[in-house]
Image: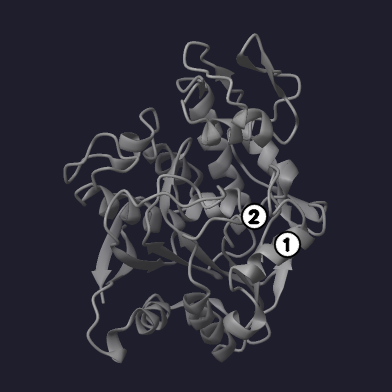
Amino acid sequence: MASPVYFANLRSRDEKTSTVAKVCALFDCAGFASAISPGDKTAIKLHFGELGNDSYISPVFVRQVVDKVKACGGLPFLTDTNTLYRGSRANAVDHITTAILHGFDYAVAGAPLIIADGLTGRNFVRVPVNGRHFTDVAIAGDIASAQSMIVLTHFKAHMVSGFGGAIKNLAMGCAPPGGKREQHKAYPFTIPERCTACGKCTAACPKDAITIRDKKSAIDRNLCIGCFECMTVCPERAIDVDWATEIPKFVERMVEYAAGAVRGKEGRIGYMSFLTRITPDCDCVPWSDAAIVPDIGILAAKDPVAIDAAAYDLVNAQTGILDTELHSHHAKGADKFSGVWKDTDGLRQIRHAEELGLGSGRYELIRI
């Protein structure tokens, strides 16, 4: 059976149809109130953006969700988990500082900030899953302890998973650094003829696994944790992975982590995805590149698979924007995500999630 996915476009000519009003209307139409009981500690799961990034969801929109949760009697808190790589969110102190600098303080967002895996990523529990790769996964303790959750996602492209949507927000976003490491487990390599020895990969590597030898970068697999940060920052795209064998397993591991993140909260989670500033990279990078398609709107659903499938289709239905990282597939209906990262297969997320019973890739788009 098709899952309902509610959609609001970004057109507005008065306060009743403003984006702020539409966020509230989507919360109501999708029935999120039924997921929240009075007294619930309700996690508002989002991404605060790496320092230097500016494409994350506006805290003004987050405030509307916070106020809706409060009206249901819930006790909302804004949350995310620490990163695997070096940066401005690798520990709770830096992470909270970054979030506040990006506007996610109490005065604006109306809820406290809690980094769900603790000061250094050691607050987690093992949750059983029935996966192809895992029998249990590590989920941040304060997310696992929350009685209900609203998952707010900035939908965008991703160099490995194809796109970053609700499933990835659950998987990587609800895992401590050790859980993120379990999901990656893929090893990049240098393409020597492309490498210019610029050193950006060595600076980005959180484990000092990359050195410059004979004017080329060299990756030590014994130290590499497969976080792909080197691939993200390489201006020559001189670092790659074995897409045929490594990446399908990465995507499946990621989906199995998403299944662990929702365990115990069946019927207690709502998802809202913002199809705005659809960038070629994750908000984990310390920049925001130009959007690859025009802004589309906002989605809301109780099914993470359906909302990702709908977002994927809506992006691909657009005409791609020229002079961006979208190098091909500009036509309406073409796969924009493989037009940015040519070897990606975003639909593998949908397929494996359906196999696990996480949700349905079939959806009914309901415009409000």
Can residue 53 be seen by looking at this rendering?
yes
Left or right: 28 as drawn, with respect to 134: left
Spatial separation of the CA atoms under disc 1 and disc 2: 8 Å
Left or right: 247 as drawn, with respect to 95: left
**Residue at x 61% of width, y 29% of height:** 201
Q: Amino acid at mark 1?
A: Ala
Q: Amino acid at mark 2?
A: Cys
Left or right: 278 as drawn, with respect to 59: left
Residue 305: % across, % down: 42, 53
**Residue at x 53% of width, y 43% of height:** 255
272 lies above or below 291: below
112 lies above or below 99: below
Colour treatment of the image: one colour
Can residue 135 be seen by looking at this rendering?
no
Residue 348: % across, % down: 41, 37
CA neighbours of label 2 inside 10 A, class few (<14), some (14 to 19), many (20+): many
Q: Quadrant of the C terminus?
A: bottom left
**Residue at x 76% of width, y 57% of height:** 117
Q: Quadrant of the N terminus?
A: bottom left
Residue 294: % across, % down: 26, 57
Reading the chain from its start, which is encountered first: label 1 or label 2?
Answer: 1
Check whether the beta carbons of the residues at disc 1 and disc 2 lie within 8 A of each other: yes
CA neighbours of label 1 inside 10 A, class few (<14), some (14 to 19), many (20+): many
| Pointer 2 residue | 174
| Residue 119 location, quadrant | bottom right
Residue 350: % across, % down: 41, 44
The label on residue 116 is 1
Q: How many marks?
A: 2
159 lies above or below 222: below
225 lies above or below 242: below
